[in-house]
Image: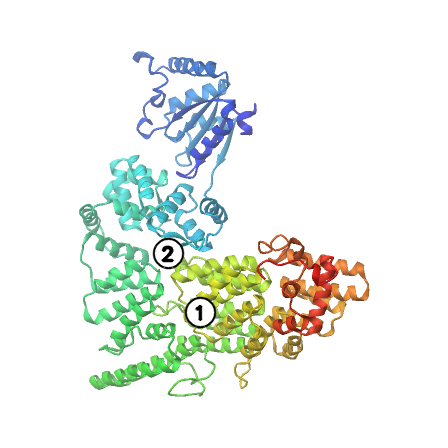
Amino acid sequence: MAAIRGGTHVAVMLLGDSGIGKSTLMEAVVAELGPEVTPIRIHGSPSLTHVPYGVLGPFIVGLPVQEATSQLAVLRTLWTHLEEERRATQKPLLLIVDDAHDLDEATAGILVELAAAGWVKLLVGAAARPGLPEPLLQLWFEGIAERHDLRPLTQPQTTEMLEQTLGPQVLPNVAELLWEASEGNPLLLNSLIDDAKNDGTLLQRKGVWLLTRPPNSHGDRLTDVVRRQLLRRSPEERQALNLVALAEPVSRELIEAVVGEDAVAALIVHEMIRVSAAPDPELRLRHAVYGDTLRNLISPARSLQLRQSLLRLMDTEPTSAEGLLRQVSWSMECGAEMEDRQLLRAAVLASRLYQDDLARKAASLVQDPELQIAARSVTARTHYNTGDFAVAQGILEADFGTGHSVSSLLTGTLLWAAVLSAQGHTPADIMARAGALVQAGERLAREKPADAGRIRAATQERYMTIQSMVLALAGELGGETPAEAGAAPPEPPVNHLDEAFRLSLESERLLVAGKPVSAFEVASNALSAAGAGHDELHFLTGFLIVRSAAAVIHGGDWQAAETLLARFAAGTGPSLISFGGGVHAAHGIILLYQGKAAQALNTLSGALESLRLADPQQLFGLTAAMAFAAAAEVGAREKADSFLADYGSLRPAVSRYPRTLAEMAVVYGKARLGNHPEAIAELRLLGQPDPGQNTAGLEFDALAFCLALGDRNAAARLLELKPQLEGRRPAAICDYAAAVSTDLAADHLSAAKSCEDAELWGFAALAYDAAAHAYRTAGDSLRERMAMSHRKRCLDRADNAPGQEPEGIDDSLGLLTRRERDIVALAVRGFSDRRIAAALQVSIRTVEGHLYRSYAKLNVKGRDELPGIPGN
């Protein structure tokens, strides 16, 4: 805008990929400049690139044919036309030149002459490749044109665009997946959004936008975009694009042998396809989302014809996983026959990459009876990916123990046990059923006596691995199996998976015992022990990540948690549909622990909707419980009721720690809503479920909830536990407990600083409030105001700062702490001090102290002048 209005530049040039937003930006500039200029539009055309002055036809229509190639004659005629436009408006001329890369050199020269003479200014848009014609580029070289290279959107910019388009509640994995699919190209992004909304892939549930599956790459709008791109290409270039789309990644030499070098070179220059580095350059489409669209536009007969033209020239099979999947997919699309082993390999690869439809289709075509067990196992895995555990169980149980070789006998057995765990079966029940595997091994050993030793060893090893796995999944700290009830697991582990599961169980034991730092170290070792060779247990990495995340979140190492979650989410692609909900849930729990209840509520609400679609780690119950606690914290009663119903509607988490933590969060939420007088007693019981085991970590979580509810008695027990606990969060909360025990202002200030350092803003605010009360009692009004100022600062960092209270609450009540608001609410309803103490499980002295401080903050003399709290 400044360049066009100023006197230094005669042109502004916008360069970027197709769909990057050049035309949109130019129209926005023209709209802004509308009252100041006379806009004249010129549009480049591929068909007129080699026709001198071709695009100027509408302006020089009266020029005699014999003068049509004369630059002077064309310039004179064009200027006459432009001058008439200028006189009519009495405003300076602005030539808007779109697709300037398609201008012929002669036209570009004319435009430069007009701009250089100061008769017009130019607003030019062009593709970065092949770029501007030489005459226009010369204006920039001479410093009288301003150039802007438009870049793809970053992921944060994509998120911002989605929030402007859809609304503020867009799950982070939606933004990430759409950003990856569109590569930050706004045209492709908008096309994907529209197509995904139209086909139900992108939908809104309870105000939250989420993806039910990876974005569709052949919807109507994206197809229209690709079709328009194809119309600009020559027949040879279109054939090259089709071949690359069908076979990518494919040898450049191979495509050039079919369509010629010129067609391939033109597509590379125009950035329609990209080429890998030597020595064996391969071709891929520039935008991956074009692939499905192009393939969808090709008829099966034409696809088969193109396939045959390539196969005649190919002398090797694809070596990469991507190449194999593309070849198998292409073969299935055009009805070509394939070997069973190739189909099975492709099905396994596709399921690993969460391309479930392709995996199921390839698996269904396997004909070899011995390979069909493995194929059905792949199909079961795709159902596990989407949380269809009952379907997966039905498929796997039909084949369990029926194989006629060691390989087929063991195929799918670990996934079978994982599915039963997800369905709520106990380790003892699963191991009782797993005995059928050992019996099947004995049958097979009798049938093949020469190989009997290997068969028995393999089935026994798998049995032991299943045992380790189901105990780890359930978080059972004792050996609850028919074979070895209460016995220690055998040493050494039978294989790397067995070791990973045993380390995972040890990590949970340490976490329950209050050792999150040690638990994280052991969980990290479990991740290393698991390695990468566990195709059947594709969920194993996610399971171990959950264990690791639970440890660092319990310990309050927020940076380590963010790093861990970011590393897990990075590059997971379509798996974010399955696992993204768990990542969001972890972020929400962190926010809740930090005291940022409103943000936690928003994040956990979105996570819960994502987990409705897919919940491979069974985190729905824990997430619903935490969302209920967050809603109760901010006073959102309707949402709290909905989350509580969600929590009660589904089976709780399989593992012991998250299951117990969820129960605590529900009790805490009920207490925050003021309708659960037995909350403190229930929390204490949940913290000590088995007196014979060390559950200091669970007890700490329970006592932290009690302390947040105002239970001063929790402080003494926390101090007893402190020597057993690890981590910043337990240390800070124990510091607050110590200050509660002494009730000295200096101790409260020290505890508040400790909580601030641990980013526990809710507890920090409580500590500053207690310090202010101590100073008020001592008559030190200056230090009291200082403490209250710090308290307000902490509340500003949390979610219950003034101005963020639940709708309908009197503004003056923002001065009160959460406990004070609870007590004031009951006092307004006519409760006596003794009855308030009984309802909230606190002492009468605590009630009296909170009421006294509330009177001072609200500038009232007593109960009769207290403001009402709606909804209480």
Q: Position of residue 375 (x, y in %)?
A: 25, 67
User: Distance from label 1 to label 2 (Cα)?
Assistant: 24 Å
Q: Position of residue 163 (x, y in %)?
A: 48, 47
Residue positioned 43% across, 15% down in the render = 79
Q: Position of residue 228 (x, y in %)?
A: 31, 37
Q: Is residue 230 above or below residue 247?
A: above
Q: Is residue 537 left or right of residue 598?
A: left
Q: Which residue is mark 1?
A: 648
Q: Residue flagged by tag 1: what amino acid is it?
A: Gly
* First of labels 1, 2 by sequence position: 2
Local crowd at mark 1 within 10 Å, few (<14), some, or many (≥20)? Answer: few
Q: Which residue is mark 2?
A: 212
Q: Secondary structure at mark 1?
A: helix
Q: Is residue 772 left or right of residue 625?
A: right
Pick whichever, 212 or 563, lies toward us: 212
Q: In which quadrant is the C terminus drawn?
A: bottom right
Residue positioned 71% across, 71% down in the render = 739
Pick whichever, 48 or 616, lies toward us: 616
Dividing the picture into quarters, in which one does residue 496 lie? bottom left
Q: Residue flagged by tag 2: what amino acid is it?
A: Thr
Pick whichever, 35 or 382, lies toward us: 35
